[in-house]
Image: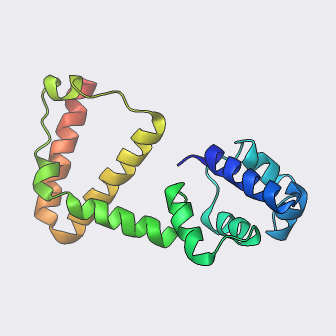
Amino acid sequence: MNGAIFGLYIKKLRNEKNISSRDLSSDVGKAITYVSQLERGLIKKPDFNTSYHLLLKLGVDKIEIKKQLEEYGILSEEREREKMKEYTQQITIEDVTSIRSDDDALSSTVPFTKEQLKKENDRIHACINNVITKDLNKAAKLLRKINRLINERID
């Protein structure tokens, strides 16, 4: 998600409508500096509801708003849950439990950004929780493997 690019889009629409950033901020119930900060890229992850209301106030069609917000990676909580569910359903228990513990598997990985690591961590947590709710024996096996991997790396 790129809040800075979304901010530039808001600025473009706002200038086309000849609305001040202060007025737009007030119209959506935010501090008078909110839109200015968003447009300058200072708000990295704008929330869905505020973003939705900004676009609504700027005259974007309701049907188009959700599409546009998804393109910018700004999702409602419901949509985030749906996407996480879709993502975790794509991963089978065999995919997760077949993690190799040798050094080759770890050394061949590409470095992650902090945001990518956070997303990967969230995905793994969701997958583990999914396994726990479906099969306690497989969950125990998975957690033993994870613990073994962690202990090998610490030693």
Q: Position of residue 132 (x, y in %)?
A: 23, 64
146 horizontally vs 98: left or right: right
28 horizontally vs 90: left or right: right
Residue shown at the point (33%, 59%) measured from the top left: 126
Up the image or down, 114 lies above or below 111; here it is below
Residue shown at the point (72%, 65%) measured from the top left: 54
Count the numbered circles shown: 0
| Residue 128: quadrant of the picture | bottom left
Q: Position of residue 57 (x, y in %)?
A: 76, 71
Residue shown at the point (23%, 64%) measured from the top left: 89
Q: How is the image coloured?
A: rainbow
Q: Position of residue 17 (x, y in %)?
A: 82, 62
Residue at the front extreme? 16
Q: Quadrant of the C terminus?
A: top left
Taking depth in this image into account, of 141 and 74 the one nearest to the observer is 74
Residue shown at the point (43%, 44%) measured from the top left: 118
Up the image or down, 61 lies above or below 148; here it is below
61 horizontally vs 124: left or right: right
Residue 75 appears in the figure: no
Q: Position of residue 77 (x, y in %)?
A: 51, 68
| Residue 53: quadrant of the picture | bottom right
Residue 111 appears in the figure: yes
70 horizontally vs 34: left or right: left
